[in-house]
Image (cartoon, coloured by chain):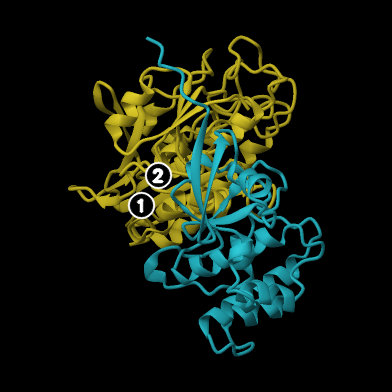
Amino acid sequence: MKEFGYERVHDVSGAVALLGADPDARYLGGGTNLVDLMKTGVERPARLVDVRELPLDRIEDTADGGLRIGATVTNSDLAAHPDVRSRYPGLAQAVLAGASGQLRNMATVGGNLLQRVRCGYFTDTAKPCNKRVPGSGCPAIEGEHHNHAILGASEHCVAIHPSDMGVALTAFDAVVHYETADGPGELPIASFYLPVGDTPHLETALPPGALITGITLPPAPVATVSRYRKVRERASYAFAIGSIAAALDVRDGVVHEVRLAFGAVASRPWRAHEAERALTGGPVSAEAFAAAADAELAAAQTLPHNGYKVTLMRNLVVAMLTELSEEAVR
Amino acid sequence: MAPAPSPTYSAITLNINGEKHTLPVDHRTTLLDALRERLDLTGTKKGCDQGQCGACTVLLDGRRAVSCLQLAVAAEGREITTIEGVADGEDLHPVQQAFLDLDGYQCGYCTPGQICSAIAVIEEHAAGWPSAATQDVRPEAGATPLTAEEIRERMSGNLCRCGAYVSIVEAVARAAQAAQSPSGGSGDGIGATEAEAAV
């Protein structure tokens, strides 16, 4: 690990001023991803600004009936919060599906959004990787890619975003709030992560030096009937090979409102707009669910070893919506 | 203008098992290495050193955390409890006693981490925290019993290469039951009954 300076801050403006536009400085939250990447030399910051003690650890109601979640709220506190569990149960489930009890106690909401991909070529500094060293190539395309992207990837990078929490936040239209030296700003989660294109090293639309201060969940009555399901290669404590956050409101036998987001299929949590459009106003049946999944997955571009994800996601959509429809009839 | 170079080491004071220890550290030092290499608290074990095995689990402000991904400098000001600090003098912690009574280990290397984690699991469950094994996470669904399935999910961050999981689950269930009924009755707690029945 490269040597680094360390400073602990207690107010947001101080944090932003300290980090400034120094490209070699990083904010430190729980450290569960950053410290790991520093050990392997993927991240080599010259300075860490420790933001864990910033007063951003609250979960509060917003005036319009949504929730505001501070950036330093831990994953554990987010998943345990009664309002999250009651109003956005799919979000609580997504957070609980990630990592382990120890890591959820350390990890923060802000850090979760900014975690890096777990692609084996990205994490091995002896290998080329366009995300780590722009222009060096993407060995995953010809190599080990059984858990790589089927949607929205490019010839430059096929890594998937590893977050579970982000998938639920995407289904519920979360807004990310940040602070820079020039003042506060916000980004809807749909435009928070940049398309891969030919710049896989540019991951988010945050301005340089920006500090995430929190996220807002807009009010979403549909989210009270929501779930998250994660498929992985062992029963617990593993990254997804495919996951889904879904919410469903059925009225008079017709889909009134539906939310669908996929995890582990793209460089970012993937909102399934095509499937939602196909379902809304239509019947509640396994055939309709499968047709909607097919509409979304028609754009899938598979590699030799990840084609199974198309079938997996199709099955997840049908199973999840079938389950929710039994709960959602009103 | 480039920022002035910051020092890469600090003198820090760590509060460990109720005692203050002041030591200079290179910022790269993890809490795990500070405990083992600098303070001779070798009960906390180094397994993978990358947050994947749980052998280095300690309690930070009462919550379980992996000390291999925790920078020592960032742990200043927090209450750190290691396996050396969980017993009450010569009286073992109920979780330690349950692991002993039920052989919740084989080689013992992962055991300090398992025990620190289990202490926290029992508290998290008592506080009403759901897990990924909880069928309905909504608070109106009520508390979920600490079944064997719940224990396995909640303890999944602690690997045991000997595969002593069957006895570990039993020990956690026994200790949780003891925590619910301090008199230490045997076998009629929901969690213990189900977990032990699963053995």
Subunit that carries the residue with mark 2: A
Alpha-carbon distance for marks 2 and 1?
A: 8 Å
In x, y percent, where is residue B175?
61, 76
Q: Secondary structure at mark 2?
A: strand
Taking A264 as reference, is B171 left or right? right
Residue type, mark 1 in image: Ala
Q: Quadrant of residue B186?
A: bottom right
In x, y percent, where is residue A258?
38, 46
Q: Is residue A232 above or below residue A198?
A: below
Label 2 neighbourhood size at 10 Å, few (<14), some (14-19), many (20+)?
many
Taking B110 as reference, is A280 left or right? left
In x, y percent, where is residue B198?
71, 76
Q: Which residue is mark 2?
A: A259
Residue at the image point whose x is 35% and y is 25% from the top:
A18
Work out whether disc 2 and disc 1 sit on a shared chain: yes
Along the viewing direction, whichever of A123 and A220 lies nearer the viewer: A123
Taking A86 as reference, is A230 left or right? right
Q: Colour of chain A?
A: yellow
Query: Mark on residue A150?
Result: none
Q: Which residue is mark 1?
A: A223
